[in-house]
Image (tube, rainbow, N blue to C red):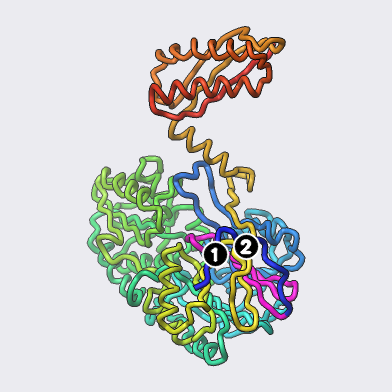
């Protein structure tokens, strides 16, 4: 298996007749999916998503792919092809279109409707191209064939990209549910046909590569949700992804079966389900949905609420309910249903929300104690099935953490793909398909770009480190007045601490040490303000470390006279 090396340098010029693939996100992580294909100087992008921040990234709203690799080549982009409408595949499109607004955005009807609603908030009117499964469309030198795949959102697509360099099949996110709730099957016949034609490179979803067997059918979840609603004595509050149309449909069906009204809570939930309803993907009986503002006037046994927050997001509706920071108050006897999978890394946040809900007397039903969710991603048995159908000459696992991609690579090797034709890459690694062989040839920058409020890319890893120190260790400020003629103290020092866990009365102990250090350096002729700040920071830092074994941020304030 070929794999990235930390010493990879910039890639060479693309050979004539070769296809270049660069993932700017989605490899070694869950989210931020974005792949750039290059042929004869033209570019095609597949997906452009976001990654959601970890707890150790305070203040960050979203994480984008780094567009630096394509920033000087925006005019070479033929189109952005979106496989489906989840945020980790479409969330960064508005930020890409800020760079060039007329890039054609290609996708299915629901996917384009979801991205258009998002772009409206950014005041961008996209150039759209709607496609359906079974169609072929040409974008410059790239001929794209679209195939239906089943996923946890309607209208998902795989895309086969044809160039003279060969056929690349990109599955997008998919599973092989044989009894999907919407009746839309993954196009296994199309996969097999492409396999017979000859797939030169298969890029396949790796998220569930460690899970044996086949994913449970979506239809098995409906009866469980119906039973939860039937047996609930008071309100039922369901938390789901705001894009999970199938799950919301099952909840609506259960509510109708048991004579309950439904309220949608959360801006993204209301927006997305409104779009799905208008396009016919969500079937809602007349009069079933009521305004969430009226919900408190209804008897608790007649109500189902559907909200966001299944991943423990701090500002989502369910988290705020758990913290008593929401107009809807969770009460004794309520039933809360977490109807989604747990995204890796969110375990602590979700457990905190569950404990908060239980504290107020709610019964919490989740994947750990009931069959209330199935994954939207193919398990190992399904991945092997696809490999056997397509028989790719080369294989590249995508969309997953390192352990997922490694597991998928092993499955590919078992299916007969030669190990030296299996490419395990990471974000920024450049893979060229030349004469039917995929190889790693270099690397380009593909770091995180942080969105913090209206700021895009201004927050650096160094700034995040400072935020973590402030959040974990607090800070100490030291104010001194310095005579710039001789570097001697003319006033102070004054010292203050916030959030550092240090006894304020003991701060006086370090003042003589600061004065002594200043005297010594003034005697050495030190008058440079930056050097004086370093002296103060080093002196206070040593005292805090020796006394408290802590490392707060130390901020010297030097006033010159």
Q: Which residue is drawn at 43% across and 27% down?
A: 499
Relative to residue 536, is residue 38 depicted above or below? below
Is residue 38 highlighted in magenta? yes
Q: Residue at x 49, y 26 (%)?
A: 475
Pointer 1 residue: 4
Farthest residue, direction top? 490
Left or right of residue 517, residue 174 in this image: left
User: In the image, what residue occupies the spot 52% across and 25% down?
Assistant: 554
Q: Nearer the viewer, residue 280 or 125?
A: 125
Q: Where is residue 290 in the image (x, y as percent from the top left)?
A: 42, 57
Image quadrant assignment for residue 550 = top left
Q: How crowded is mark 2: few (under 14 residues within 10 Å), some or many (20 or more)?
A: many
Q: For mark 2, what is the residue?
A: 443
Q: Give the range drawn in magenta.
A: 17-45
Q: Nearer the N terminus, badge 2 or badge 1?
A: 1
Question: From mark 2 to mark 1, how far is it between C-alphas?
Answer: 8 Å
Quadrant for the C terminus in the image: top right
């Amino acid at each position: 298996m070929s794999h990235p090396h930390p010493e990879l340098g910039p890639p060479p010029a693309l050979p004539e007749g070769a296809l270049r693939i660069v993932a700017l996100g989605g490899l070694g992580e869950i989210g931020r999916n974005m792949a750039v294909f290059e042929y004869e100087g033209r570019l095609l992008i597949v997906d452009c998503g976001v990654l959601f921040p970890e707890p150790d990234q305070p203040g960050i709203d979203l994480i984008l792919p780094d567009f630096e690799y394509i920033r000087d080549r925006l005019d070479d982009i033929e189109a952005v092809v979106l496989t489906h409408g989840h945020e980790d595949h479409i969330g960064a499109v508005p930020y890409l279109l800020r760079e060039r607004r007329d890039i054609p955005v290609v996708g299915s009807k629901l996917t384009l409707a979801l991205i258009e609603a998002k772009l409206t908030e950014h005041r961008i009117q996209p150039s759209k191209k709607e496609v359906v499964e079974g169609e072929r469309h040409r974008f410059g030198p790239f001929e794209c064939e679209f195939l239906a795949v089943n996923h946890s959102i309607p209208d998902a697509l795989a895309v086969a990209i044809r160039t003279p360099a060969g056929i690349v099949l990109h599955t997008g996110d998919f599973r092989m549910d044989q009894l999907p709730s919407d009746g839309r099957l993954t196009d296994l016949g199309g996969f097999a046909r492409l396999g017979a034609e000859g797939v030169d490179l298969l890029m396949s979803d790796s998220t569930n590569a460690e899970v044996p067997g086949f994913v449970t059918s979506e239809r098995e979840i409906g009866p469980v949700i119906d039973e939860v609603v039937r047996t609930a004595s008071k309100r039922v509050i369901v938390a789901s992804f705001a894009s999970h149309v199938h799950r919301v449909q099952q909840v609506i069906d259960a509510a109708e079966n048991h004579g309950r009204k439904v309220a949608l809570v959360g801006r993204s939930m209301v927006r997305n389900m409104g779009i799905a309803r208008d396009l016919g993907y969500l079937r809602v009986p007349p009069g079933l949905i009521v305004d969430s503002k009226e919900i408190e006037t209804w008897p608790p046994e007649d109500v189902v609420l559907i909200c966001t927050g299944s991943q423990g997001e701090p500002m989502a509706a369910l988290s705020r309910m758990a913290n008593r920071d929401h107009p809807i108050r969770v009460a004794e006897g309520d039933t809360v249903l977490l109807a989604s999978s747990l995204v890796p890394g969110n375990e602590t946040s979700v457990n905190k929300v569950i404990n908060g809900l239980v504290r107020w007397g709610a019964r919490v039903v989740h994947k750990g104690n009931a069959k209330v969710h199935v994954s939207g991603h193919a398990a190992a048995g399904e991945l092997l099935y696809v490999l056997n159908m397509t028989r790719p000459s080369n294989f590249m696992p995508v969309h997953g953490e390192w352990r997922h991609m490694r597991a998928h690579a092993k499955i590919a090797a078992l299916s007969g793909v030669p190990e030296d034709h299996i490419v395990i890459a990471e974000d920024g690694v450049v893979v060229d398909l030349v004469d039917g062989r995929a190889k790693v040839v270099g690397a380009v920058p593909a770091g995180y770009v942080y969105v913090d409020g209206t700021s895009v890319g201004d927050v650096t890893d160094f700034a995040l480190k400072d935020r973590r120190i402030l959040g974990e260790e607090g800070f100490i400020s030291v104010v001194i007045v310095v005579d710039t003629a001789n570097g001697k103290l003319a006033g102070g020092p004054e010292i203050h601490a916030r959030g550092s866990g240090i006894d304020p009365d003991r701060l006086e102990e370090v003042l003589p040490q600061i004065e002594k250090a200043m005297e010594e350096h003034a005697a050495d002729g030190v008058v440079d303000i930056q050097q004086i700040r370093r002296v103060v920071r080093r002196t206070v830092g040593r005292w805090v470390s020796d006394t408290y074994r802590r490392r707060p941020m130390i901020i010297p304030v030097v006033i010159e006279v």
